[in-house]
Image: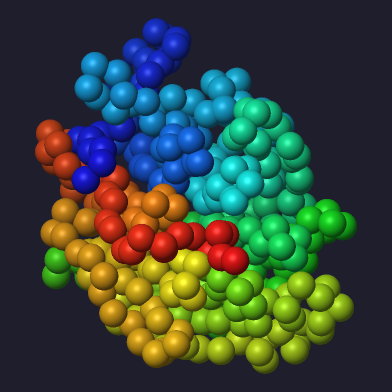
Amino acid sequence: MIYHWNHLDWDFQDPKMKRQFEANQYWKKAMPAGVKVDQQGNYYVSVPRWAQGIPATMNRIVVKNGKPLLEAFPSWDWNKPGDVKVLQSVLGYEIDEQNKMWLLDQGKIAYASSPEGSQKLVVWDLNVNKLVDSIQIPNDIAPYRTSFLNDLVVDNKNGFVYITDSGNGWPNHPLVGGIIVYNMKTKTFRRVLDRHFSTQDFPGFVFDIDEKRVYRDRPIKIGADGIALSADRTKLYYCPVSGRNLYAIDARLLRDFNTPLEQISGAVRAIGSKGTTTDGMHADNKGNVFYTMLEGKGVGVYSPARNKFHPFVSDDRMLWVDGVAFDQKGSIIFNNNRLHEMFSRPSEINWDYPYNLIIWKAYVGQDVKSYLYAK
């Protein structure tokens, strides 16, 4: 256990913002989504703006007086809500082998339609703390109303980024899930597997955590979410939250924008059931895929060589393990955020409990790193 909170708190620079945050109890919807570490050892956490009042959507963890706090990254100005040129709502992001951060901006705040220009890929060089690029994701690629840009993987060797669109950005309406491919060289996007069965919710899917139905008042419907790229960059793995299957497709088909959409749809392979529903995934440099286990309260591993799924680590406090990544020192890092309890109606969280939100580390092996560092 690296860090833990009863609820998130920020290192506020503006006393007025701090007063509003506390008076309105905005922390009740401040959910740490993904955790990663850079080459300097700094830890980062995204906090998507799925409700009003989130101070900063991208953050670095700082420790002051022994207490972990969030510090707006790269600055408070870069986290100003309402300004489509800066970060509006970040869920998924990646830190690549060049120490560049790829931020996927959902654009939407509190599930409103994404304003034009707000959906984007922002690339930030952590070595020199400088903006590299900001690429808008247009409406015809990720519809502003229905899109829910979830997570991404980066392939610098071939010059591509792969993005999951969960398609649940318009609550109480049908999902529009899909995969988005970005060509770094041409700076163009292509949407594939739009509303394909593998990127949609499994019909009628429900699940329990600790024998308690998740979202009892309404069925959970989240399409393509977890995504992982194999160490050799040839296979793209992905899965919906509303289902237990893991899917894969040959990434080489996706890299050729002339590949017919029908051919791509026919090339999807169902690997099989993980035995749990999953949020985040991440591949290592050995060919394995680590996946979060929502029902299993932990993290599991898929071994393509043996075509086997098996649990890796679990703890009763690992309630809704969201993201998983690597520290490049032999360990995975991951976080749990009790999403299902935070956003249930009413919230089911005891906010006095000191271990509501936790960042964990688990040793895998001396030479185990992220897929990004595969030779």
**Residue 293 position within the rendered picture, expressed as x and y whole percent measured from the top left:** 30, 68
Give the position of the C terminus as an image quadrant.
Answer: bottom right
Q: Residue at x 23, y 56 (%)?
A: 319
**Residue 180 position within the rendered picture, expressed as x and y whole percent measured from the top left:** 68, 65
125 vs 116, left or right, is left
Q: Which image quarter: residue 128?
A: top right
Q: Residue at x 56, y 47 (%)?
A: 95
Q: Residue at x 23, y 38 (%)?
A: 4
Viewer-proximal residue, 81 or 272?
A: 272
Image: 224 above or below 272: above
Name the colour scheme. rainbow
120 vs 15, left or right, is right
Image: 136 above or below 243: above
Q: Residue at x 55, y 73 (%)?
A: 230
Image: 129 above or below 205: above
Viewer-proximal residue, 171 or 163?
A: 163
**Residue 337 position within the rendered picture, expressed as x and y whole percent measured from the top left:** 30, 48
Give the position of the N terminus as an image quadrant.
Answer: top left
Q: Is residue 293 visible?
A: no
Viewer-proximal residue, 96 or 201?
A: 96
**Residue 134 position within the rendered picture, expressed as x and y whole percent measured from the top left:** 74, 40
Q: Is residue 284 visible?
A: yes
Total marks shown come to 0
Q: Which image quarter: residue 261?
A: bottom right
